Amino acid sequence: MAACHEINYDEKIYEKPNKILLMGNPNVGKSVFFSNLTGIHVVSSNYAGTTVSYTEGTLKLGNESYTLIDVPGTYSMEATSEAEEVAVRFMNSNPIAVLCVLDATNLERNIKLGLELQKYKVPIVYALNLTDVAKRHGYEINVSLLSKELAAPVIPTVAVKNEGLNQLKDELQKVINRPKMACGNCSSCPACASNMLNTWDRAREITAKVRKKVDTKLSFLDRLGSNMLKPWPGIPIAILVILLSLGVIVGGGKALRATLLLPLVNKVLVPFFKMVFSSFVPEGTLLNVLIGEYGIFVIGFEWIIALIFPYVLLFYIVFSFLEDSGVLPRLSVLFDNIMRKMGIQGGSMITILLGYGCAVPAIIGSRAATTKKERLIISSIVCFAVPCISQTGALISLFAGFSPVLLILMILLSLSIMMIVSSVLSRLLKGTVDPMVIEIPNLLMPNGKAYGKKLMLRMKGFLLDAEVPMLISIVIAALLKETGLLAQIAVYLEPIVSGWLGLPKDAVIALILGIVRREMAVAPLLAIEGLTALQAFVGGTVALLYLPCLSVFGILTKEFSVKVALTIACSTTITAFVVAGLINQLAHLFM
Amino acid sequence: MRKKNSEKISNSLYYAKDNLQYTITSAPELGILKSLGIVKDARVCKKMTHWMGGPVLVKIESSEIAIGKDIAEKIMVRG
């Protein structure tokens, strides 16, 4: 029977024996099931398309071990998108069983996929998830009747609270040990194909039978959720949410820095290492490299712990909350009209916002865009005008010495560059951008445990991924400064740095380090004494627009090509010098 | 010509009146629309059209879906 299909099993994962597939519509909680069943934590959010590729883990049922695969969410098995193609390939790769997650609040559509999966003749267990939300919406579902209609076990679950998961495991074990069905693994041979007809009608019929609507009063969150979709009061609420988020990140980060981290660095860590090293290292270049003004053990702590860390932490606290609550897709809807005029669509907003944390996940996340043109525009916007949180933290500290007006000007500058880049590219690049079609998830209070895990995962990721390049740039800084090399390089770059940009010659170090990491294009400016407000702004502008950091360059090469990476890097750098220089020259003309 | 045009506009989901139930008579052949249940004969409740070329908001079953202007204009409905 397997001869029905000719599929290239080129990747090892498709060949693995004992596979159990975790399938279902997007945003039904598959990743939560995966985390709870395997103990491996994957990032889950409250919007469609968090899992763009699959994840695998080990699931123990009794004494047997199985490979559980978190397949990207699909609405159908018609292979209309990359995610759906992956799902179809997995279904055709001889899985031993399928765990299909159904969203109890959207039965018709979910049952339709559930019925489509049955065509593959693989044992299925259904998890009826989000039963708590369905109840809140006034839906009563007859689970035993649904199980009869689907001719398979259906287990009601609330995955985020771990409810029903043990029962689910038991049922999985039962269906796996049951004798195999007669028909093989095939969806397009004539006998099976006749069943394909009218899955929609059948799904509607089943839904009508098993679901009863009882009147309930809408909860506050439900009412807020639908109000946030209307321009009034949606837009004022959205602006409030954005301002509040900014306030928490900037204010919280500053407070954490001033009250806890700065004293820790200046009063404990730095003096301690100064004492240790000066006790056995003789005075000279080596001691300076270690604990001098730019010493590794001085700026290493100052920059990483006191400057960057508080803002990264606060950003992910706020952003993860927005993700899990379902606020982000609502912002997409409200701002789709503006984004449409910029040549992209509202759905891309989530990816761009992700870039305010770090450009790397944003560029990977742009895979969710349906056309290559849109992916390129999103990635360019992120590289040009979206500062990562580490850089934002450094910019906030830089401008803190002057006036908040500088920060507002910088935000306006970044927004206008975003619009220009998007409008220019949408005209320049060939191809189309598909209009927005998104499903709006329920607004809900994030689950404490899932939220905490995600935050931990992200902070761990930041510390592991960012630490090495940061240390490298700090070592470079220490060597350049303390060996006197910096002064020699500065002579060559003087016309650009001092002449055109009007910055002090020490700013050269920022330009060199900015190649490695984005915040390092700002941090050295903080150490320069007597910087004027204009110089701070010009330096900030260069840093904002400057080269994407090395990791971003790497991910651009991987996701697109070396050519795309080089084009983006060159154009951002040229724009950085032109725009920052013009600001400096014009300011001098008028002042 | 003009009559035909205005007829077309009044049948499109984008220009249909808010807060009413409609049956879809034709929808573009688009994977994502099919998947979400925006198919011929499906019943949807149109909530609103956003200003300045924004999306249309519809409710189908208990899920709310936002559809960009360029697609919503091509979805035809009857009351």
Image (cartoon, coloured by chain):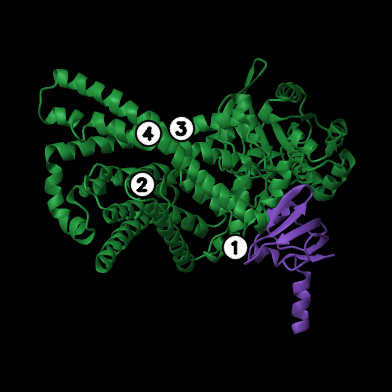
The residue singled out by tag 3 in the image is A459
Task: Tell me the colour chain A is drawn in.
Answer: green
Q: Is residue A213 found left or right of A162 in the rendered image? A: right
Asked if both marks, 3 and 4, belong to the same chain, the answer given is yes
Q: Are marks 4 and 1 on the same chain?
A: yes
Q: What is the crowding at mark 3: few (fewer than 14 residues within 10 Å), some, or many (at least 20)?
A: some
Chain hosting mark 2? A
Secondary element type, mark 2:
helix
Q: Quadrant of the N terminus of chain A?
A: top right
* Of residues A302 and A236, the one drawn nearer to the viewer in this rendering: A236
Front: mark 4 or 2: 4
Residue A305, quarter of picture: top left
Q: Residue type at mark 1: give it.
A: Asn
**Residue A337's disc number:** 1
Q: Earlier in the sequence, mark 2 or mark 3?
A: 2
The tag earlier along the polypeptide, 4 or 2, is 4
Look at the numbered disc 1 and give the secondary structure of its residue.
helix
For chain B, give the colour.
purple
Residue A395: mark in rendering: 2
